[in-house]
Amino acid sequence: MRIGTLTLFILFLTGCSLPYLNRNVEILSYEEYKEALPTKITSKFKLNGKLSLFINKKGQTGKVVWDFENDKDFIHILTPFNTKVAEITLLESEKKVTLKFSNNNQDSKKLISKIFGNKESIFLLKEFITTPPQQLLNIDNIQIKYGNWNIFYKGKTVIGGRLLPKIIEFEKNSIGLKIFVSDWVL
C-alpha cells in the first residue's frame, strides 16, 4: 500500500510539474504534424511501458503491453504488480473495440473505458503513439493540438530506422493518460 501511494505521489508531482518543464516546447497543429509524417506504415509492433491514467484527479497507475500484428491489437493493462486488469482488442479494418476486465473494480472499469473503450480515442491514441512527429528528431518536447486533445511527446528513440517516442501524454478536459515506454519491438 505504501509503495502504491508513493508511486501515485511521485507521478502526481511529475504530472503537476509538466507545464513548468515544458517551457521549450514546440507546439504543432494537427496539419503540421500530418504534413511531416513518414509514408512507411507500421505493420507490427510491441510496446511495453508504464502508464498513469487520471480522470477528475482520480487515477490509476500500472503497466501496459501493446501488441499489433495482422490487423489486430492486443492491449493488456496490468497493475504495478503484473496482475491483469483489462485486455483490449482492436480490429483495425473494422475499427472495432472489445474490452474484457479481469476483476469487478468499478473505478478501474470506468477509468479504462473512458480512454480505451472509445473508438475515436483509442485509434487516435494508436496513431499518435506509432507515428510521432518527425520534428521530434531535433526537439525533445513537442505538443500537438488535435480538437480538444493535447498530445505531449518527451524524448525519443530510433529503432530499425523508425522514430518512436519515450514518453507520450494525452490530455482532454479532465482526462489524462501518460505512457512511459520502456521497450519497443518492431
Image (cartoon, rainbow, N blue to C red):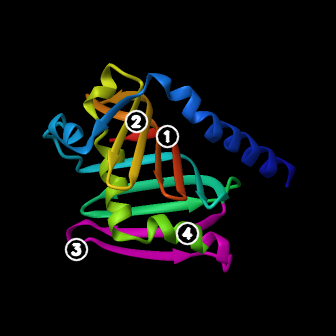
Residue, disc 3? 94
Q: Nearer the viewer, mark 4 or mark 2?
A: 2
Among numbered discs 1 and 4, the one appearing first in the sequence: 4
Q: Which residues are magenta?
A: 83-108
Q: Which mark identifies residue 86?
A: 4
Q: Which quarter of the figure is the N terminus placed in?
A: bottom right
Distance of mark 1 from mark 4, alpha carbons? Answer: 19 Å
The answer to the question of whether label 2 and label 1 lie on touching residues, with beta carbons closer than 8 A, is: yes
Q: Is residue 154 left or right of residue 163?
A: right
- The CA distance from mark 4 to mark 2 is 24 Å
Q: Secondary structure at mark 2?
A: strand
Q: Which residue is mark 1?
A: 181
Earlier along the polypeptide chain: callout 3 or callout 4? Answer: 4
The residue at the point 21 percent across, 37 percent down is 32
Q: Earlier in the sequence, mark 4 or mark 2?
A: 4
Q: Which residue is at 53% across, 53% downward?
A: 176
Q: CA distance from mark 1 to mark 3?
A: 27 Å
Q: Disc 3 versus disc 2: distance between alpha carbons?
A: 27 Å
Mark toward the start of the polypeptide (3 vs 2): 3
Amino acid type for the residue under numbered disc 4? Ala
Looking at numbered disc 1 in the image, what kind of residue is underneath it?
Val
Three-letter amino acid code at disc 3?
Answer: Glu
On the image, the x and y values in percent for residue 3 come to: 81, 47
Q: Residue tagged by mark 2? A: 165
Q: Residue furthest top?
A: 138
Q: Are marks 1 and 4 in contact (CB under 8 Å)?
A: no
